[in-house]
Amino acid sequence: MRCRLLIWVFMINLAGVNLMAQYRLTVPVNQMPELEVSSLVDLTATPGAKVMLGEKLEITGGFGLYGFTWRPEQLVESMHSKITRATIYESTTFTLVVNDISGCSDTVQQVVLVEPNSNQIRGIKETALVYPVPTHNLLHIKLFDNNSPGGITCHVYDVQGKVVFEKTFGFNSSGDYSINLRMLDPGTYTLLIGERESIVRRQIIVY
């Protein structure tokens, strides 16, 4: 995105005619080169792998220091770092927004494709049943072969990556859990079900 300075010029007819003409000029003043971010190489990983995002990122142009924002923020270790690390359990598209101090920005995406294998995530298998979707209040969760004695924690994130619901459950050998989402506004959310390093991620809809 190129930033330009807008100059408004007002002229008054001094010959006695009460007339004012208005002109709008777009003039680049000391304009830096356009802020541009290089494309990122897509990655391939196995479930539960830790990957580095943003490596070999190149930035040109812009003005002053750069700021960084990764999305979805709940999956990265540092959302405001140029290079960050993420633990991947399913194929995910990450978005990086780069800003300079003048307000210009550029956006790039990096896709991490997960190749399924026969390995089981520690404590909880990746496979889970979440229903009904969409839901208006109760959301039921069925974890298969739930052998973790430490219980689980459920986090629900909105589209901005903010936590809007959190609940921790004790161990349940049946793997059956329920959460009440009646207080949430209608929309699309991300549900993370996890205990320690075991994570199940699902998209849910509340109406």
Image: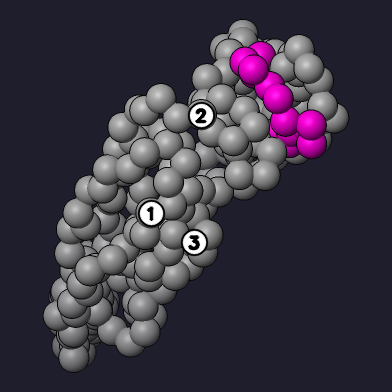
Q: Is the residue marked by circle 1 packed among few (<14), some (14-19), or many (20+) residues within 10 Å?
A: some
Residue drawn at (33%, 43%), measured in percent from left and top?
45
Residue lying at 22% horizontally and 69% vertically, measured from the top left: 56
- The answer to whether the residues at label 2 and label 1 have Cβ atoms under 8 Å apart is no
Residue 111 horizontal side relative to residue 128, left or right: left
Q: Which residue is mark 3?
A: 79
Q: Which residue is mark 2?
A: 120
Q: Residue at x 44, y 59 (%)?
A: 85
Q: Which residues are magenta?
A: 142-155
Q: Residue furthest top?
A: 132
Q: Is residue 205 above or below residue 19?
A: above
Rendered-image quadrant of the C terminus: top right
The kind of residue tagged 3 is Met
Which callout, 2 or 3, points to the residue nearer the camera?
A: 2
Q: Amino acid at mark 2?
A: Gln
- Mark 3 neighbour density, 10 Å: few (under 14) some (14–19) many (20 or more): some
